[in-house]
Image (spheres, rainbow, N blue to C red):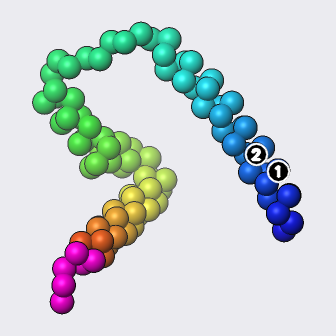
Amino acid sequence: MQPYVAGILLVVGWGVFLYSASKRWKLMTLGGNDLPMDRLGDRFAKMFKFAIAQARMPRHKWAGIAHMFIYAGAMIMLLRGLIMFARGFVAD
C-alpha cells in the first residue's frame, strides 16, 4: 500500500472515530455530575456477579455456553500474559 493511501485512511479513520466519540461524549454529559457513592458493597457484589462471574450467560443456552468458553479463554490468556509480564521482573 502506498504511504499516501495509508495516510488518507488513517486520517479518515481518526475523523470517524472522533465524530463518533464526540456524539457519545455529549450523550454521557447530558446527565450531569451525579456520582452515586451509596451502597458500595452492594454495587461491588453486583459488579462481581455480572461482570466477573458472568451470571446472566446460562439464561441463553447455546449462546451462553459459547460465550462462557470465549470468556474463559480470554481469562486464561489474561492470566498467562500477567504471568509472562511478572517473569520479566524475576532474574533466573
Q: Nearer the viewer, residue 73 or 79?
A: 79
Instruction: Find out whether the residues at labels 1 and 2 contact each other: C-beta distance under 8 Å.
Output: yes
Element under label 1? helix
Q: Nearer the viewer, residue 18 or 40?
A: 18
Q: Is residue 40 magenta?
A: no
Q: Nearer the viewer, residue 31 or 52?
A: 31
Dot 2: few (<14), some (14–19), or many (≥20) neighbours within 10 Å?
Answer: few
**What residue is pinned by disc 2?**
11
Element under label 2? helix
In the image, taking residue 37 as reference, residue 62 lies left or right, namely right
* Residue 2 x/y as whole percent: 86, 66
Q: Quadrant of the N terminus?
A: bottom right
Q: Is residue 88 magenta?
A: yes
Q: Is residue 15 above or below residue 72?
A: above
Task: Answer with the quarter of the image where residue 12 lies.
Answer: top right
Read off the magenta span.
Answer: 87-92
